[in-house]
Image (tube, grey):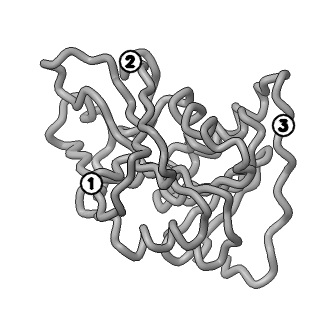
């Protein structure tokens, strides 16, 4: 069920459970997402400033992952090394440029469905404000989407604070994001709105997506 829906710039933001929402959607050129896994927010001092949620009880199920492959032609799934996905050469690696004694991992990996060589993006984990404990830098998500030049429609079913859709707006792509938590949904709406108001003048802005289709359970 779709609880709420907002269309901002060229982006579509949906508040609801992705398992029930995805069957209502059309196919996408690609999925770019970061499912929750092993957040450990209560035990990690770096994340204790964020409100504790029930993420650690959540495990991306086979149903989630099978649906992602059914709804899109290509997938980039951060933390994909934690999930039961087919073998792939095409891992994307975020080198966080951290010292070995830092409290978090020195890198993170995204599973990529494409049969290609692994790629590495180097950017410090420090120096950007995070509204979500596992929020990725916008530059990282722009880097991911840059490998998908023909993907004009992109789905993020675990939208969080909306970084994937911010990157889509900045790159002139149409993104659809689904988020279960209303607080992070509101944050995502604000961030996408800010990106819409501060366009890159060298990149054509994405066209607004069509209004809601009839038959949606709002």
| Residue 101 placement: quadrant | top left
Specify whether residue 191 is in view.
no
State the residue in front, 76 or 116. Answer: 116
- Check disc 2 and report the residue beneath it: 124
Q: Nearer the viewer, mark 2 or mark 1?
A: 1
Which SS class for mark 2? Answer: loop
Position in image of residue 20 (x %, y %) = 53, 77
* Mark 2, other Cα within 10 Å: few <14 / some 14–19 / many ≥20: some
**Mark 3 lies on residue:** 205
The x, y position of residue 153, in whole percent, is: 71, 54
Q: Residue at x 52, y 58 (%)?
A: 179
Q: Is 34 situated left or right of 147 in this image?
A: left
For mark 1, give the secondary structure: helix
Q: Earlier in the sequence, mark 2 or mark 1?
A: 1
Q: Mark 1 and mark 3 in contact (Cβ < 8 Å)?
A: no
Q: CA distance from mark 3 to mark 1?
A: 35 Å
Q: In the rendered image, which quarter is residue 120 located in? A: top left
Q: Is residue 184 visible?
A: yes
Q: Which of labels 3 and 1 is toward the front?
A: 1
Residue at mark 1 = 82
Disc 2 to disc 1, how far (Cα)? 23 Å
Crowdedness near tag 3: few (<14), some (14–19) or many (≥20) residues, C-alpha within 10 Å? some
Q: Residue at x 40, y 76 (%)?
A: 63
**Residue 201 drawn at (x, y percent):** 84, 22
Where residue 40 appears, x then y in whole percent? 20, 45
């Amino acid at each position: 069920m779709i609880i709420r829906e907002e269309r901002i710039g060229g982006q579509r933001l949906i508040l609801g459970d992705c398992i029930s929402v995805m069957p209502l959607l059309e196919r996408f050129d690609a999925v770019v997402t970061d499912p929750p896994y092993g957040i450990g927010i209560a035990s990690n001092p770096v994340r204790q400033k964020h409100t504790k949620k029930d993420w650690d009880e959540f495990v991306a199920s086979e149903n989630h992952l099978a649906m992602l492959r059914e709804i899109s032609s290509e997938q980039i799934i951060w933390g994909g090394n934690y999930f039961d996905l087919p073998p792939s050469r095409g891992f994307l690696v975020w080198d966080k440029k951290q010292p070995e004694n830092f409290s978090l991992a020195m890198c993170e990996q995204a599973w990529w469905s494409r049969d290609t060589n692994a790629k590495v993006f180097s950017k410090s984990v420090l120096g950007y404000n995070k509204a979500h404990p596992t929020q990725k830098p916008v530059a990282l998500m722009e880097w991911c989407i840059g490998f998908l030049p023909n993907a004009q429609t992109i789905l993020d079913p675990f939208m969080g604070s909306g970084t994937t859709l911010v990157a889509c707006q900045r790159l002139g792509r149409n993104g659809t994001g689904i988020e279960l938590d209303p607080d992070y949904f509101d944050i995502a709406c604000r961030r996408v709105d800010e990106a819409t108001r501060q366009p890159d003048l060298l990149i054509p802005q994405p066209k607004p997506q069509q209004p809601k289709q009839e038959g949606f359970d709002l």
